Image: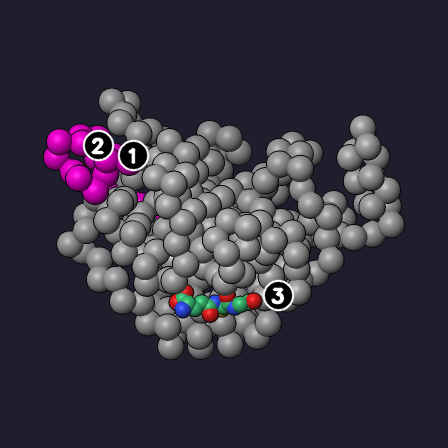
Amino acid sequence: MRHITSLIASTLRGWKGSHATARTNQPDKLLELYDMEGCPFCRPVREYLTELDLDVLIHPCPKKSTRNREKLSALGGKKQMPYLYDPNTDTGLYEMQDIIVYLKNQYDTLPQQKKTEPNVITSTLASMTRAMSGILYRPSLPADKPLELFSYEANVKSRIVRERLTEMEISYVLRNSGKTQIVKSEPIDSNLSSNAHNQKPSSVTPLSKRQELHQRTGKIQIPYLYDPNSDKGLFEPKDIIHYLKCTYGKTPENIRIHKEAVNG
Ligand SMILES: N[C@@H](CCC(=O)N[C@@H](CS)C(=O)NCC(=O)O)C(=O)O
């Protein structure tokens, strides 16, 4: 059932966030997004990040949670998602529309192809299809280092994993791995592209996320979750969810392990 409603959600959005329309060199510093997987205003931002092939550190802020919401409030002044922080330009932005325009101006190497008015109605319908998944907090313990998730926005199975990471308020690096339409990397030349000035100049063609995944795991299968805290990597959503529950769920045993780690 979870997979069917996730499929409907992607269909409602016209499978936006399936493809990377350009191979983008990542900026020096990772973008950060305060986000809630089930929020209709966050979804178009994540779709666009997939299309731009940009990785982003996600700080999930489910309802009734405190960890990331406090950080968000200190950073931007209010608890509203989405909130994008770009450490490369020291820019912090609320409002989906403003974030999308900022990303377009700053990082889109093919700016003429993208219109910047996302359809919030279909995004709301997609969230309704998934009921309260990716919105409500599930008590959890924080991970020391952020987890890493190879995913793309429209991927049916990835959504189920992102929802659980949101509910457990676990920060993760979203390695956006959309299907690549333009396989060849465009070398960034700051004289030619004013939009791309914030990206790492590169004379070497970087590996695509999918190539990197293949090198690391021997296959290309999405989602793939890697936890640097335990050096564990998993592919199947049911295995990932089980792992997250066992490792970060607020059980007496995990609380004890967490306390020991914190106290050294
Ligand atoms: N106008 C804002 C609306 C954002 C918004 O309403 N976000 C909701 C989540 S869907 C929110 O932050 N609610 C406050 C909360 O969850 O505490 C935008 O376009 O980004």
Identify the mark nearer the N-term, 1 or 3.
3
Residue bearing mark 3: 63
Magenta residue span: 176-198
Looking at the image, is mark 3 or mark 2 nearer the viewer?
A: 3
Does dot 3 land on a helix, a strand or a loop? Answer: loop
Please tell me which residue lies in front, 59 or 75: 75
Asked if marks 1 and 3 touch (Cβ < 8 Å), the reply is: no
Please tell me which residue lies in front, 181 or 187: 187
Residue at horizontal 59 percent and vertical 56 percent from the top = 69
- Spot the residue most to the left: 192
Residue at horizontal 79 percent and vertical 33 percent from the top = 261
Q: Which mark is residue 188?
A: 2
Q: Is residue 191 magenta?
A: yes
Q: CA distance from mark 2 to mark 1?
A: 7 Å
Asked if marks 2 and 1 touch (Cβ < 8 Å), the reply is: yes
| Residue 93 shows in this picture | yes
Q: CA distance from mark 1 to mark 3?
A: 34 Å
Tag 1: residue type?
A: Gln
| Residue 60 shows in this picture | no
Residue at horizontal 36 percent and vertical 51 percent from the top = 49
**How would you rate the neighbour count of disc 2 (Cα within 10 Å): few for under 14, some for 14-19, many for 20 or more?**
many
Q: Position of residue 10 (x, y in %)?
A: 42, 66
Q: CA distance from mark 3 to mark 2?
A: 40 Å
Q: Main secondary structure of the magenta part?
A: loop
